[in-house]
Structure formats: C-alpha cells, structure tokens
Amino acid sequence: MVLMTSLVYGTIPRELFTAKIESIDLSTNLFEGSIPPNIEKSHNLTYLNLATNNLSSSIPSTIGNLHSLKTLILHSNSFIGQIPSSICNLTSLQFLHLSNNTLHGAIPKCLGHLSKSLQVLHLKENAFHGLIPPSFPNGCALESLDLNGNHLRGKLPQTLANCGKLQVLDVGNNRIQDEFPFWLQTLADLRVLVLSRNRFNGAVSPIDDDRAPFQKLQVLDISENKFNGSLPTRYLATFPAMMNARENVTEKRNWFSKYEESMVFVIKGTDQPVVRILTTFTAIDVSGNYFSGEIPECIGNLNSLRYLNMSRNGLTGKIPSSLGSVKALESLDLSSNRLSGEIPRQLTELNFLSALNLSGNDLVGEIPQSGGQFPTFDNSSYVWNSGLCGFPLTKKCGQIPTLTRDDQDEDEDESDFVDGFSWRPVALGYGCAFVIGVLMGCFVMKYGRPKWLLEPFFGVRKEIRKTKKWKVEVVEVVLGVDRGGASERRRCGEKAGGALAGETGAAAVPDLEKGRRQRSSCAVRRGDGGGTRCFQSKKEGDHAGLEETASGVAAAMAGWGSGVVAVWPRG
C-alpha cells in the first residue's frame, strides 16, 4: 500500500496491518499518534516506510515479530524512548533508518551482529549515548553507517575494517576520542569519511602501503578536532577519486542510487545539505585543528577537487601556486593561519571559484585582478592581512609599506581596522550616544544630579538630606553665592516662623534638626536693597510639592543676580 506525499492526516488505521500485506509506504504525510501495536499481525511485511510524519510515542516492541521485514524507515518523526531490544530478532533487515527523532539510550550491540544482512544503518540526529557497537563480524555487509549528531563516546571500533563494502562512514558531532583511523584506508569502496566535531587527536599518519590509500574517497571531513603535526602529504597527493573524476550514472555500487539521504557539509562557509553524493562531488575539510607547516605543492594533483577548507590551523609558508591547477575548485578557505608571501596569480585562472577566504594571515603585496573570479570577491576575503593592498581593500598599493604581522605598528592596525569597517557601526554608535545623552540630560535637569556637572554650567546646586531621627527631607538651592550668611538665614527663619508658626527667636532658626518645625520656604534677597521673601509649601508632608517650591524660588531669584534660597518642608 502506497500513500506517500498525499498529505493525509490523523492516526494510522489499525486495519491496515493485515496478515497478507507486504509493503506499506505512508511517508511524507501528516499522520500523528503512535504505530498501532497490532503491527505484529503483518507477518509477511517486508517494507515499512513511515518517514516524515508527526508520529510520536515509542517504537513498539511488537515490531520485532516481523521476521520478514527487510526495510524499516522511520526517520523525521518525533519518536522517543529507546530502540526496542526486540529489533535484534529482525535477522533479514537490510535498511534501518531512524534518523531525526528523539530516541535515546545506548545503541543495541546486536546491531553490529546484524550487519551481516544490514546494508544501511542510519541513526543520526538523536540522543544516543555510550559506545558504538564494538563488534562488526567478518562478512559485514554495511554500505553506509551514519551516527552523526548524537552523544557517542569512546573509540571508533576497528572491527569496522571487516565491512569491506562500506561506502559512507559518518560519525561527526559526537564525543569520540581516538586517533585518526588509518586502518580504514584499506576499505576499497569508502567514498565518504566524516569525523568532524569530535575529540580525535594526534597526527594524521598514513600507514606504509604500496597501494594508494582510500582509493575511492571523495569526501574527507576531519574538521573541528585536535589533530596536529603536518598535513598528510601522502593522502593529499594520492586520492585517486579526486583526480580526473567523471560522473558515472550507470554505476551500481554507489549506494545512493538505492537510497537517497541528505548529508551536511560546510560548503562556502555555511552548512549545506547534500542529498546525493555523485562521483564528481569532492571535498576536503581539515579546518579547526592544530595542523602546522606548509601546504604541500602536491595538492595541485587533485585536479577534480571542488571544496577545500584548511582554515583555523597554524599553517605557514606560501600559498602553493599549484592550486591554480585545480580547475574544478569552487570554494577555497585558507583563513586564520599564518600564511605569508603574495597571493599566487595562478589562482585567478580558477574560473569556477565562487567563494574565497584568505583573511587573517600574513599575506603581502597587491591582490591580483588579472582575470577569473577575483574581481567579484569583496574585502571580507582579504581583511586582517596587514601587507595586502589594492582592490577591493581601501589601502592603495604604494601608500603604506608592506610589513608582516610581527612588524606591525599601531598605524597598520588602524589600517586593518578601516579595511573591514563600514558605515553601519558608525551610525549605530551615533544613534546610541544621542539616545543616552538625551536621557542623561533629562535626568540631570530633573533631579539636579550630578552636582559637579551642574555647578560649573548653571551655578546651581541642589542638596537633599534626611535626618535619621525624623527622616525629614531638607532641600536647599543656592544660586551663585555661598550658603553662608547665617544672619540672613536666621532672619528669614524668624520671619517665616513667627508669621506662620507663631514662633520667634532661636527656636525658629531653620537648621537641619529644627527645620521640620517650619511651615514655609523663605528666600533672602541680597544686594540692591536686600529684603526677605517667604514662600509657603503647597501642603503639609508633600515633599514633591517641596521640590516644586524650590524650583519656583530658584526661578524667581534668577533675575536677582545673587541670593540664597533655603527651603524647608512643612510640618
């Protein structure tokens, strides 16, 4: 029964699983819920494909009773739980594809033993932990093993060397800690080897063998590990599948002709899925390691190489001019190394080159523009090379001497900064500064803080004090003169206190402790005749009103030229 890509929704009908049915394909629909447990009744079922739906729950253990089942495809759903141990009973199983779910737990060890019949084992993008099954027996029939994107640890089992038909091995994005598996080079059919984003370490040292290693390898991804030492010259010089490659559409040994599966590679700086690995797709990614030394000239022998990424290592020396012989090259990333010298003009002969990154090195000289794709690359391909000049950088050749990184001074650092600079951060900085300035100005004008900023510009100081005993707020505003003049303050206090509180003499002096007794604000006018003015607060206990009163007094005295304003709260 086939209902693939029909956008059917709902639950899977229980009635579908009869004793006579042999094939069920409900892939790429909107089914939800769980797999009906009565699936065990379908004893003659050989093909079950429920991929790309919304199925959840766990995989039923009754699925282990389908002894005739050869293909089980459940990828791209929301299955949870562990792989049922009953799956070990499926001795005829050839394709097991459970990728892109939420399965967890350990991978059943029996899957290694099932490899005598199992050709495809894909468990990527789940949450499996523990070790990779340690035993893959002689006669292992695996053609593709994809465990990418889990939490697997330990070492890569060397019994995988028993899988002589293995074409794809992807264990990227795990926690495997091991040395480079040089013993895999004896696998004559291996096309894709992905070890990226693990904890592999040590030197990549080929074993001595008269035969060319990895005779059919077309994708090597060992990025984001801890490999060190020099680049594996023997490998880079003798990958036969990366030399004079031609597409063979009739080749039957390519397992992708049987089953399509997407794989993710870093291409032109971004992660991109590749659905089908053709024989003309070739890539080497050794980025994010600790490789040192020079890039060997023999890299030019790989004339069918399309994607080369050696960024973020410690490579030195010059960019080999032999890269100009790799006519099929589409993406070249050598950034964040310590490469020196000039950019070889032979690179301008790469007519298919659409992505180039040479930034973060010690390159010098003029950027070649004689032809090819070079005029299409922007300054991001060359920044952080203090000695480079010419289009598209802002530094013109002949203006500033070209020096290496060890000889840089501060002026050259600034030039590098300009090369990678643009108007956007400048506009962002001005915008943020304007907003912050307006907010701070409003704060200063409203609260009179900070005093050191107000005094030199406005001659205004606003003090707010609180006594511990009475917690009475006392506000005093001084315009242009010292707060001295105790007699004026006393006279003001006496007048205010006597007129409004019926108190005179020392008891009405408006100091900090006794000011709470006053019921008014007063201002002492000095100069041109002197005089005293009293301002009453709006209402008792209203400190906000007191602030407003202080502001009013200050405004009134602005025309006096000088004076003292003392404001006390009422009550």
Image (spheres, rainbow, N blue to C red):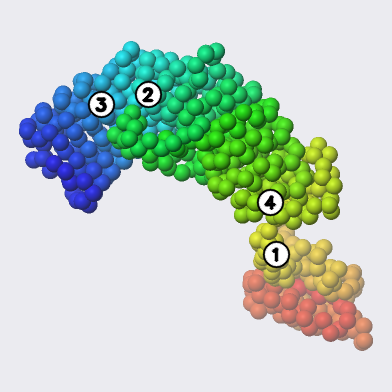
Q: Nearer the viewer, mark 3 or mark 1?
A: 3
Residue 302 locus on image (x, y percent): 55, 32
Residue 96 locus on image (x, y percent): 28, 29
Residue 433 locus on image (x, y percent): 70, 63
Q: Which mark is residue 86?
A: none
Task: Classify 534 as above or below 337.
Answer: below
Please give the name of the residue rendered at 64% of the width and 54% of the height, measured from the top-left corner. Answer: 375
Q: Nearer the viewer, mark 2 or mark 1?
A: 2
Q: Nearer the viewer, mark 1 or mark 4?
A: 4
Label 1 sits on a secondary structure element that is helix
Q: Nearer the viewer, mark 2 or mark 4?
A: 4
Mark 1 vs 4: CB contact within 8 A: no
Instruction: Give 270 or 191, whichever is nearer the viewer.
Output: 191
The mark that comes first in sequence, 2 or 1, is: 2
Task: Classify 345 as above or below 95.
Answer: below
Please give the name of the residue rendered at 81% of the width and 65% of the height, measured from the top-left corner. Answer: 453
Q: CA distance from mark 3 to mark 2?
A: 14 Å
Residue 98 locus on image (x, y percent): 30, 33
Badge 2 is on which residue?
A: 166
Q: Is residue 181 left or right of residue 570?
A: left
Badge 3 is on which residue?
A: 94
Badge 1 is on which residue?
A: 430
